[in-house]
Amino acid sequence: MRVSEQKIEEIRSAANIVDVVSDYVQLRKRGNNYVGLCPFHTEKTPSFTVNETKQIFYCFGCHTGGNAFKFVMEYEKISFPEALQKLADKFGVTIQYEKEQDSGEKDAQEILYEINNTAARYFSNNLLQNPDGEYARQYFSKRKLKTQTLRSFGLGYALPSRESLYQYLYKNKTDIDKAVHLGLIGRNTEGKYYDKFAGRIIFPIFSAYGRVIAFAGRILDPNENAAKYLNSPESSIYIKGRTLYGLSAAKDDIRKLDYAIIVEGYMDLISLHQAGVKNVVAVSGTALTDDQVQLLSRYTKNVVLLFDADTAGVKASMRSIEILLKKDIEVKIVSLPQGEDPDSYINNFGKEKFEDVISHARNFLEFQTSVYDSQGMFNDPAKTAEAIRDLVKPLSVISDELKRTLLIRNISQKFNLREKLLEKELEKILEAVKKTERIPERKPAEKKNGTLLQAEKIKNTQLLRTEKEIIALMFEGSGNVINYFMEHIKSEDFEDQVHSRIAAMVFDTYRNGEDIIASALISKFED
């Protein structure tokens, strides 16, 4: 199925880029443009610009730019069809799909989604209806999960037979090579296909918009000589470090409550959700990443970390603090009693007691201080100094100077230290960070011809600047301006390949008697 060019144009016309970007970025008017902090890289001074007249955005810091479709694709990490559907839904445009004349026209990513959907149905049916799924049903029953919860999260079971899923996919005329690519099917040295997830309970992993992008499997038979957990490999529709388990089910509640709880495991999240605590996402077997935090920051700027009470859980919390602070997220941490995890706690004590624990979450300084205290670091002057430096270190990634100052004061009062002393420690850390960010010296070979290289660099910079100015004039000028350029230069005269392609499209559009619309040309350029 495909969308007609006319319908794409209708969505483009309806989706005012200022309205689109404002859902994600706080914009303010400056002259003819709107400016804000770039969502694609960390910055303190706004370099992100939105031009309502041209319907385009551009960041002068990281050089990311495009139209409304491109913005949504980049920010949401989704495909063009998904961005199209999202904007159509937002602006009330009904999409009418055209039938494809050839199956080869089908979007490659869409095929992968369909294969995952087929596999998800197979796994779910095994768990809920297949007599051979009784062992898996008993497992989930012991974990106190209701049938409706199993359905809501698409939980499933892969039969122990090594060819069950393969036969199912084959009968459904699925592209087996693509199923291999997705990690559902394996192929041995003899060329024989087999089920990768055989004998495992299955947790489908969904995108933020509820599409199955991967699977996680946990071995059910404790006597089975295999890895306890198995995950889908990364693919064009699944990047582990950019995915938060359960986000599609949690995002509305996260927005409403304006905070998210981050847990470690699938069962932690599912049990909390079943109990009515729905503003929860899980990192699931990976350390929290910058991309995951960026993804979460679309919905809230407040996070409560709720990892296991064991040593690994404490370390995971400590690692996550700096990553969250770097994205201007307010961080609090909950420590459950020793031996408890979110799954066991909610089942043992219920929602009311759990929410009481969450309401007493500590800020990151209190949490870190308690951890260092439990490790005996405040019993020795040298270790105390080390601990205090570790407390100051996360402050270096906080962009809000007022917040940094207040946190310095907090540490100062707690340990009876002069604020100036702590500020000096912070300055040392900031200076060390700056050094690592500086451009490294040229290699010896480059130094040898440094003058020539510098001259060449200046020449290339001037040329690119001139080409950019010509492109800008084409968009801003009248037909006479474009005529002038068409008479004096050719698109292939541009040194930069991107500039050359843009010029060619502008010239072709003008020859066809069409208006030069930046956002429309960007879509063609991306195609």
Image: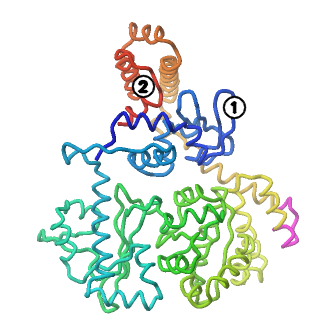
Provide the major secondary structure of the magenta segment.
helix
User: Which residue sits at x=77%, y=57%?
Assistant: 404
Please give the name of the residue rendered at 52% of the width and 60% of the height, measured from the top-left corner.
292
Residue 31, x across and y down, in percent = 69, 27
The residue carrying mark 1 is 30
Rendered location of residue 158, percent (x, y) = 28, 79
Amino acid type, mark 2: His
Q: Is residue 414 magenta?
A: yes
* Bounds of the magenta segment: 411-421
Is residue 459 in sight in this rendering?
no
Q: Nearer the viewer, residue 168 or 438?
A: 168
Q: Is residue 493 left or right of residue 372?
A: left
Does the stretch in magenta take in 388? Answer: no
Residue corresponding to mark 2: 499
* Image quadrant where residue 365 sits: bottom right
Q: Is residue 69 above or below residue 145?
A: above
- Residues 521 and 408: in front is 521
For discs 2 and 1, the disc positioned in front in the rendered view? 1
